[in-house]
Image (cartoon, grey):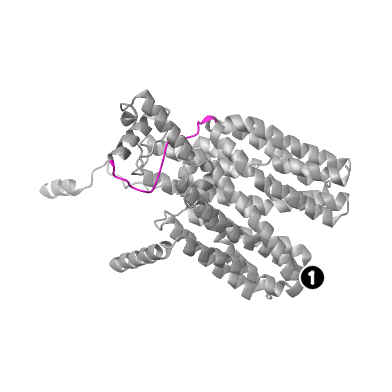
Amino acid sequence: MASQMNAAQNMPPQNSRKPRKEKSPYLQILSYAEGRRFSFSAATARLTMSMLSLGIVLAMRMIYHDWTNAGTLSAVYVFFAAVCTPIYARCFDKFGQYITGRIALPLSSGALLVFVLALVFRAPLWSLYIFAIFLGLTQFSFGALARTRWTNLLRKEAADGKMSEEKASQLLSTAFAWEAAIDELIFIIGPIFATSLATSVNPTSQLILPLIAQTIGGAIFFTLQSAKAKPTALITETTSKPQSAEVNEQNDSAAQAAPAGSTIYRMDSDAPISDQQRLSRLSPRRWLRLRRSMKKNAPKLALGFPGMVTLFLTFIIYSSGFSAYDVSVVAMTQAHHIDAASGVYLAIYSAGSLVGAIIYGSRSWRMPLWSRLLTMMLLLALGFGLIDVCKDDLILFVPAAFIAGMVISPVFATVNMIVEDTVPGTFLTEGLSWLNTGSAVGNSIGSAAVGVVLDHFGYQWSFMMPWVSVLFAALFVMATHPSVVPELASYIRLRIRELRQVA
């Protein structure tokens, strides 16, 4: 009897359960119904980014039988799209996605429809350039808009106390990786759709599909509840830490001057001022004087915030290697008389980037952002170097391209996180869009440079350009951020110490 009682006492409680394993970060972000809606609708709408430029070239070649004007017309469209994307982004940040989108989407879809009709009716070449300019002037980035919504969604969850700031930051990194994975998937299937439709259906069908996708996906995207979220207001934010009484007084004044519901940052701290402090005492005269002063001194563009110009220039240097890689792959396949396989080799590279995005987003990163960016760039330079070594062996080239591609999306996701960490909410869409502009400028420079190299030296030398450009971008980061190398070294020492303790 006693033994039975002792056994009963030693038995675990009936209601004891093993702790639940935490869901994957991807499942956590996709558990938000609104997040799923705006992410998938934006993915549908941005099918244009991988089909329009190539689609213009294919249509011009098949209808007008003119390679020169085909390439020039596509370049004109890309240039004006790159110039105007940040301008639209500023409008989205200032007036909100719902208001701006109701105007921008019909303009963009209408411009594309007019361009398609001009091709169908074989309009004069000079008029096509006008339509291409107008088409470029109406382009904006759905990817940047989706990333802004993820930021607003997760920031709100943290502000409501549903998760910690650290958790929100980790999930935001996953969300950016998720969007990068979608981008890569679009860049894999987009060219396949474009070439298949142009050759088997109609010379303009590869432009009609993105028109339909953008119109339907964009309409859904801009009618969602998250489109009506008001832009976050910012009074002031600085990295300096003045300690004068005047600063404390201005902090209280900034809190009072801000509109209700906005996020305020102290001049001597990154911590938001609470709603009670926003109700601090302030005379109307001082309120107006302070508001005018802060409005005058605040940056007018996202590039005005510390670090953004450096990041923009870094991205131009970094992106120049990608167009050089694409053109070099085409030249390599032509040299081996397998022209049709160029798309397959490019798709392998993009597939690696897709896998890299999934892996990157599934992890919680402790490495500081700039150190992470430098590390990823150095790894990518090594990957491109491996491709350069394997360029004459078409079998070894495949795993080399896949391995190098695995670092692409993590770099983009990290850069997006740096922008999110650098600019306030009222400039976030614009800040992300400047990356698209930098990428377009870099791609243009790379395309022009690789053409010269190919004409004079062939693809054996052009494959040097990708790893040289990425390595130069990494050196530029080290030169403009002297603290990044000691920071990275400190992180590595910390990780080694932790691993030794575990062992």
- Front residue of this view, candidates 26 and 315: 315
Q: Which residue is drawn at 65% across and 43% down?
A: 84
> Total label count?
1
What secondary structure predominates along the stretch shown in magenta?
Answer: loop
Return the x and y of residue 371 as percentages of the image width and height.
44, 60
Return the x and y of residue 237 as percentages of the image width and height.
41, 42
Image vertical order of residue 432 relative to residue 446, above or below: above
Is residue 332 visible from the viewing direction of this image? Answer: no
**Residue 409 located left or right of residue 398:** left
Q: Residue at x 32, y 39 (%)?
A: 247
Badge 1 crowding class, 10 Å Cα cut-off, few under 14, some 14 to 19, many 20 or more, is few
The residue carrying mark 1 is 337
Residue most toward the top? 284
Is residue 387 visible from the viewing direction of this image? Answer: yes
Q: Residue at x 38, y 28 (%)?
A: 287
Return the x and y of residue 364 as percentages of the image width and height.
42, 53
Q: Does the magenta stretch include residue 243?
A: yes
| Magenta-tinted stretch | 228-244
**Residue 166 located left or right of residue 36:** left
Quarter occupied by residue 109: top right
